[in-house]
Structures are given as structure tokens and as C-alpha cells.
Amino acid sequence: MTWSATLLRGADDLDVKPFEPVTNSGVVLVDTFGETGITAAKVMIELASKSTTLGIAIMEGAPLLRYDNPGTGAWVIDTPDLSFGPMLCREISCIEHPDLPDLWKVEFTVSGFGPVMATASTTIGSPQITVGVVSRPRMASAYRANVTPPADALDGAGAFTRTPWQNSGTDIGGYAVDINTSPVSIPIDQTVITITTVRRWPFQNWAATWVGADLSAQTVALEIIADEWVGARNTVAFMGFPIGSLLFESMEIQPLHHEFKTQTVTFIVDEWHHAQQMPLVNPQFSIPTTPDAVTTMSHTTVVLWNQTFWDGFEVAATNPLFSVAEMDYLETVFV
């Protein structure tokens, strides 16, 4: 076989924007001089075979490769380095030259995401992250107002302890607002924080192995998010919010561009650390009351905290929730 290939870059321009793909395109001229029965399908199969004779390898869904010879004598990725890993070939068209039947024109488009890598560890540009904040009240059933929740405590394993919340019937303080032992609704400060980032889900490399941005084998462990994160409170201070005040409400993942997704994490900050109030009930299942001479009403004598969120999560630069650059942004801007 006397095939040869020439790579002609149609456009080396890069347009890098937050939350939008980075694209690049080019043309490969494949000369099949002396061969018969050649079709577009055969040309595309040959380009996907990693033929060292052609020196160029193109396959939909895989990185564009060039055979580095002379040089390393190995296949190398021939697209700009991006922070989310190699660009992949998204479109391929193969057209026979109308006047030269042995010549085929192969047009391709590659795309990826993220800032361009300046070095192996630094990027040109900022992380792709947006933060939304909504402040709102939570209408809570209350026996007391003007109360301060206890400071959460952790055990040696980093888990919440029950002691600050379950303290042998000690009253929470504040002033009574219940009406004859019936709680009333009062507004409690809440802040809803949504953090949206870009994530790359696994894609297949040339060996048909599902890999991540660093080209190592990767899977998506959705059960970890459901089992260990959602419904948990923070065990370390994060974005200026104290331990226990931040609830991991949800994670939403939506398609963005091929294997790229938007990942939106929702946290809720609560003035009472997501706890409720409850009356102390005696062994006869009655509520002890104390009369108020001014209002002539009876109020619950002892009110306790009822904390139901005992699972904890830790946001750190070493976990998969946020990258090092994203953590730097969140911990620097929000204090």
C-alpha cells in the first residue's frame, strides 16, 4: 500500500470562554495513489488504524494523534493542552477529490473545555465556576425566640457528637413566644448557595478504556454523593460558614457538551444549624408550663434542641467535589 497523509491545519485559532467548548479544525489530505476500490469508509478505517505509514490517526470520539518520527517514535496528542484534558475529534467528513480520484480530503473538528495549559500544572485563565446566592427566611415552629444554637463538636474520627444538642434537659434560653405551649412560626435566616462548575465524565481512549481528564482509568461513583454527601452538614468551616451550619442539599448534573457536564451543588446555611425546637415532656407525657403574669398565658417551661442531621461532609482540595483552583476561589472570595 502506497498511502500517504498530509495534515493541513484549517484553523489554529482558539476561542476560550467560560462554560463554552474550545474548538479547533483541520484537513488531512490522504493520497491513495495506485490503489483501487478505495471508498470513504476505507479511508476512515485506515486513519483509525494508527498506521505509522500515514503518521496521523483520527477517530471520532478520540484524541487526534500524530506519529512523532523522527523524535520519540511514539504517538502523541496533536492538539492544544487544556485543563480538562485532551480535545477529542467530534466530526469527520471524507470526500474524494473531484478531479484526482486517488486523493481524499478529510475534514475534522476537535473540541474540549477549559483554560489552555501554560505548563503541566498552570493554566492561562481562571477556573470555570459560578456562584449564586439567595437569602431567605425559613419559617420554623418555635417555642423560644432570640436563641443561639450550640457550637457543634466533633469526635476523634471527625464525626458530629450529640452532646451539644442533647444536654440532659438543659433549657435553650431565649424568650418565650409559644401560646399556651403551642409553638408559633418565626422566620429563621437561611442562605441558599449554588455553585456550578464544569466536569468531564469518562471518555474512551484509543485502547477503548474509559478514562478521565488525566487519561487514567476513571468511573463515576454517584452512590458516594447520595450516601455520604447529600443531607450532611459541614464538619469543617467552609466559605466563612462555621461547622454544622452548612447543609449539602443536592447535586445536579446536566449535559453540556458531549462528555462534559455542568455540576451544580446546592448548600443551605441555617441560623439554627438546621435544628428544630421541642418541649421537654415529663414521664406522664404532659408539658410542664410556667405562667406569665404579664400575658396571662402559660409557656413551656423547658425547651430543647432537636438536631436530626448527624451525617457530616468535608470540603477539601483533595476530594472530587471541587478542584484546587476552584477551592482557592471559594475560600478566598467568600470569607
Image (cartoon, grey):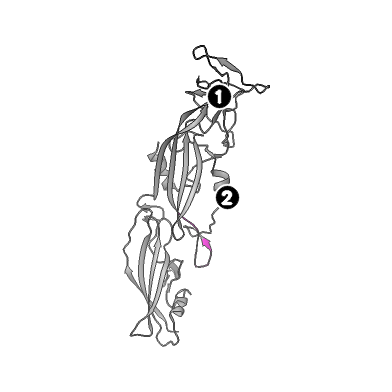
Look at the image and tell me whether residue 58 can be seen.
yes
Q: Residue at x 39, y 47 (%)?
A: 130
Outermost residue, top direction? 293
State the SS at label 2.
helix
Is residue 201 magenta-colored? Answer: yes
Rendering coords of residue 95 (x, y %): 38, 78
Is residue 24 magenta-colored? Answer: no
Residue 32 sits in which quadrant? bottom left
- The quadrant the C terminus occupies is top left
The residue that disc 1 covers is: 182
> Relative to 277, does residue 132 appear above or below in the rendering?
below
Q: Residue at x 42, y 66 (%)?
A: 90
Q: How many marks?
A: 2
Look at the image and tell me whether residue 70 can be seen.
no
Q: Amino acid at mark 1?
A: Ser
- Magenta-highlighted residues: 199-210
Rendering coords of residue 58 (x, y %): 43, 71
Q: Residue at x 34, y 83 (%)?
A: 98
- The quadrant the N terminus occupies is bottom left
Rendering coords of residue 41 (x, y %): 46, 78
Q: Nearer the viewer, mark 2 or mark 1?
A: 1
Q: Nearer the viewer, residue 165 or 242?
A: 165
Residue 133 sits in which quadrant? top left
The residue that disc 2 covers is: 223
Of labels 2 and 1, earlier in sequence is: 1
Q: Amino acid at mark 2?
A: Glu
> Relative to 33, does residue 270 appear above or below in the rendering?
above
Distance from Cα at disc 2 to Cα at disc 1: 41 Å
